[in-house]
Amino acid sequence: MIDLTGATIGFVIMLGLMFIGLHVGIAMLATGVLGALVYFGPPVLLSFGTNLWAVMNDFLLTTIPLFILLGELLLRAGITRNMYASLNDWLSRLPGGLLHTNIGACAMFSAVSGSSVATAATIGTVALDEFKRRDYHEPLVLGTIAAGATLGILIPPSVNLIIYGALTNTSIGQLFAAGILPGVLLTVLFMVIIAAAALWNPSLAERVSETPPLSERLSRLRFLLPPLGIFVVVMGAIYGGWATPTEAAALGVVLAFFLAAANRALSFSMLHAAFIATIKTSAILLFIITAAFFLNFIVGLLGVPQAMSRAVTALGLNATEMILILVLFYLVMGCFLETLSMMVGTIPIVMPVILHLGIDPVWFGIFLVIMMELALITPPVGMNLYVVQGVRGRGELADVYRGILPFVAAMLMMVGLIILWPQIVLVIPEALF
């Protein structure tokens, strides 16, 4: 058994390894190996092979490469530009004009890609091209893309929610259902902030002088059908009881193949690029998951969950106080660690406390993902900031920093809302399950 001091030292060592640039999977695996050697000796390391087989033999983890492949196929199928144009037909009349289109396009692409970075790169490429011809406050434009893209890890299907579910043995179906309403509300909050900013200072956004005829706008609505259709089929198959998340992901991939063919984008070179990108991303994620499971195994043997529970009991913290402490904890960590590193690295330490305090693991999964969203746009390590600046290809990164500030406030407001009213997260899972 280990005491709280020993557990804290191990956690600091793991974070230190990440800070000096070691890959998150290697940092977690090294910490687990070090703990095993110090407290149990070399024979315990023989269990790594059993852990590796148990993790890789999990049918649920097949979902990860399938959803990644789904996003890659749609990314290369060329449907994004048409989708953006169709959304612009209907959202550009709102105060803020095309800025709302950025948020709407990010939300819609998130619903099929499951990745914030892919969403930022894809929507950024399409949107920044459009804004070159228009008079908008550029930092706010960049902020809408960087912040809107964070919806990729909240709106289902989300790869981060799948990883959280696998690590905590939480239902993926319930997590996906729990992410729907917060995702919609956060999208609306972003749009409210844009409208308020445009009304307060009209120079931030160009006024729309005219819109295409109604017949033309109605005709272009067909470009919204591919992403909406995949989302409805995938989520409907899961919640209708017709397919597991893995089978639903496979069904989405099949539909993406047909969409790419219908859009005349299907070719051997396109498939090769999509498969290579999927293999690279999946290999990295599965290695991290394997390392996390081994670390969890060692943490369990050392009695860290019991030590954390005793510490929380001694402090007399209730669930709300603990969550507020975690908000500050993740805000600080999000400034220095990549999101997946932060999530996977802290789950073995934090989850026992969450369960001890009786906090719903489904609710906590959504809370954790929203904190990961914040980490994606908080400098100096926010990944989306660099992706958007990379797509932009000019100017200073400080422009993106200024643009995301109102959206950071919106995310913190969303965190406050789900703390005050947990049913925002739980109402749909409870209704469905």
Image (cartoon, helix red, strand yellow):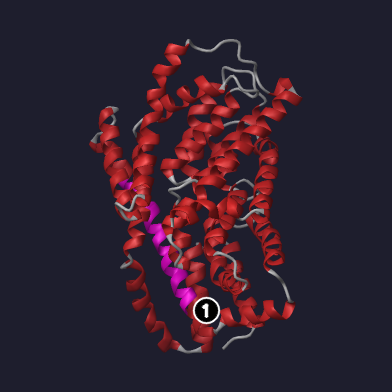
Q: Is residue 12 left or right of residue 77?
A: right
Q: Residue at coordinates 37% horizontally, 83% vertically from top-left?
A: 46
Q: Quadrant of the N terminus?
A: bottom right
The one nearer the camera, 232 or 410, is: 232
The crowding category of the residue bearing disc 1, from other C-alpha atoms within 10 Å (few below 14, some 14 to 19, many at least 20), is many
Residue 203 quadrant: top right
Q: Residue at coordinates 71% horizontally, 29% vertically from top-left?
A: 196
Residue 422 quadrant: bottom right
Q: Position of residue 427 (x, y in %)?
A: 54, 52
Q: Position of residue 366 (x, y in %)?
A: 55, 55
As shown in the figure, which amino acid type bears the numbered disc 1? Val
Considering only vertical position in the picture, is 353 above or below 140? below
Q: Residue at coordinates 37% horizontally, 30% vertically from top-left?
A: 225
Considering only vertical position in the picture, is 133 above or below 47? above
Q: Which residue is mark 1?
A: 299
Considering only vertical position in the picture, is 409 above or below 295? above
Q: Is residue 358 left or right of residue 77?
A: right
Q: Quadrant of the C terminus?
A: bottom left
The one nearer the camera, 261 or 212, is: 212
Magenta residue check for 291: yes
**What are the residue bounds of the magenta stretch?**
275-297
